[in-house]
Amino acid sequence: MGVWALSDEEALELIELGRDDNVLLVAIPLDYRRRAITLGINKILKESETRKRGEKRVKTSKARYPLAKASEVTALRATLDCYDLRLANPKMPLWQIAQKVGVSARLTAEELKSNDAAAKDKKLSMTSGVSRKLKQAEAIIENVAKGLFPVGA
């Protein structure tokens, strides 16, 4: 969309369709000074402004594929990375996927060598984090088939 001069046909078509809440028709006499035109347009816009301060300009998306909800891109990226790594390496332990993707705190070299309780707890936590990401990825993929994105579990 944008601002443009309507042809006679476009103006008649707009009038026939009726006033759209998102479009304002304005007649501008071209023999007026630019300052007078600008002042007049500003006055009209101020009077026709219906939204409150801080309110969104667009209430409904006109996107071809609108988002079902706002999502954090980095979290979606991590979810996709976990899913892709799992597909490529189905036998890889989930804690190793977490280690590669960086879903949670990574194991240090010392923790990787040792098999103490703290390292086991950390691996278990990493495993559950990746498991949640994989379930979320599968739910997102299912919902994409239904036309909803990004809707997870």
Image (spheres, rainbow, N blue to C red):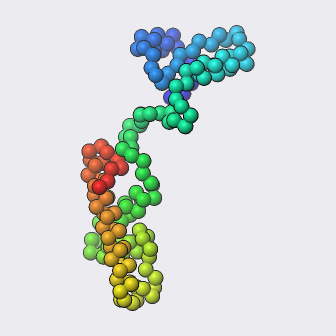
Q: Residue at x 41, y 34 (%)?
A: 60
Q: Quadrant of residue 67?
A: top left
Q: Quick one: which residue is furthest to the front in this view?
A: 52
Q: Residue at x 37, y 40 (%)?
A: 65
Counting from the top left corner in percent of width and height, residue 121 is at 35, 80
Up-down relation of residue 107 to residue 129 (above or below):
below
Q: Nearer the viewer, residue 100 or 18?
A: 18
Q: Residue at x 34, y 63 (%)?
A: 133
Q: Nearer the viewer, residue 81 or 150?
A: 150
Up-down relation of residue 89 to residue 38 (above or below):
below
Up-down relation of residue 89 to residue 22 (above or below):
below
Looking at the image, can residue 4 be seen?
no
Up-down relation of residue 96 to residue 141 (above or below):
below
The image shows a total of numbered marks equal to 0
The quarter of the image holding the C terminus is bottom left
Counting from the top left corner in percent of width and height, residue 58 is at 47, 33
Q: Residue at x 58, y 20 (%)?
A: 47
Q: Nearer the viewer, residue 95 or 53?
A: 53
Counting from the top left corner in percent of width and height, residue 52 is at 54, 31
Q: Quadrant of residue 78?
A: bottom left
In the picture provided, is 123 more to the left or to the right than 145? right
Q: Nearer the viewer, residue 71 or 46?
A: 46
Counting from the top left corner in percent of width and height, residue 151 is at 33, 50
Looking at the image, can residue 57 be seen?
yes
In the picture provided, is 2 more to the left or to the right than 95? right
